[in-house]
Amino acid sequence: MILFLRSLWFYIGMILAILIFAPLSLLILPLPYQQRYRIMTKWGRFVIWWLRKTCHLTYQVQGLEHLPTTAAIILSKHQSAWETIAFQEIFPNQVWLLKRELLWIPLFGWALATLNPIAINRRRIHQSMQQIIEQGKQRLAQGLWIVIFPEGTRVTWGQQQRYGIGGALLAAQSGYPVVPVAHNSGQFWRSRGFIKRPGTIQVIIGPQLESTGKNAKEINFLAQNWIEETMQRFFVSESI
């Protein structure tokens, strides 16, 4: 019961914060992007702080020394909404590759749209790939990092789906490095669960993968291998 009440209190605070930040996002549209980004990502920072206070769930990061000094493409596991929020604290200014339907969500989607995500129609694969490459190159040239979840959707803890080629294709075409990321958020914040369990989420950032001289399949293979091999460390520690 205590976990339910803590989780309920967390969601109440998160929703109230959305009700504040969503209208604010429209008011600050005339501002330059960097200023809008700083203001709007305070919502994510509040949510992570509120999660720690209400549900006693925090995180630790390993591998920050691997982050390049230039913009990069983050290829990460996707197990819950947690990483979409926490990455705003962990990584430099970023945009996200996401399905366009998220922008249709009242309030939340409107606020999200003001941060220039790459919103694709997943039913039109060829058009989506072109959009990822064209808009991805533009964002990278602006110094923005791009967060991509190559499995395409939230995956239940302990499971794996096929890695899409879009992020690796962008890396091969743009020459920007890939930063692989593994984490265990799904142990504490289930992909479609209400309860948030207390503990410490571990985020592991891998060595950057240079894209120059590699094709998309090679980049995707290297990223997937590193991520999935690193995930095994979580499963081993869980069983001990």
Image (cartoon, rainbow, N blue to C red):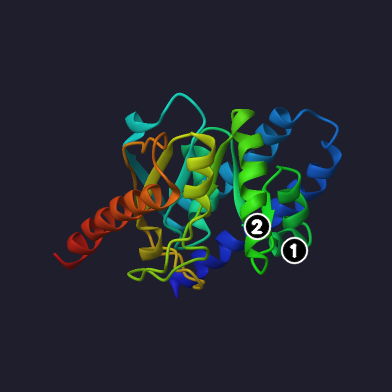
* Position in image of residue 200 (x %, y %): 34, 52
* Position in image of residue 139 (x %, y %): 64, 36
- Which part of the image, by quadrant, shows the N terminus? bottom left
| x 26%, y 53%: residue | 230
Who is closer to the viewer here, 182 or 62?
182
* Position in image of residue 167 (x %, y %): 51, 49
Q: Nearer the viewer, mark 2 or mark 1?
A: 2
Q: Residues within 10 Å of mark 2 (few under 14, many from 20)?
A: some
Name which of mark 2 and mark 1 comes first in the sequence: 1
Looking at the image, residue 121 lies above or below residue 180: below
| x 53%, y 53%: residue | 166
Q: What's the amino acid at mark 2?
A: Ser
- Which part of the image, by quadrant, shows the C terminus? bottom left
Q: Quadrant of residue 37?
A: top right
Structural distance between the alpha carbons of marks 2 and 1? 21 Å
- What residue did someone put label 2 on? 128
- Looking at the image, the residue that sits furthest to the bottom is 1
- Label number found at residue 105: 1
Number of marks in the image? 2
| x 30%, y 58%: residue | 228
Secondary structure beneath label 2: helix
| Residue 217 located left or right of residue 24 | left
- Looking at the image, the residue that sits furthest to the top is 69
State yes or no: discs 2 and 1 in contact (Cβ < 8 Å). no
Looking at the image, residue 225 lies above or below residue 191: above
Q: What's the amino acid at mark 1?
A: Ile
| Residue 146 located left or right of residue 21 | left
* Position in image of residue 144 (x %, y %): 59, 33
| Residue 162 located left or right of residue 15 | left
- Label number found at residue 234: none
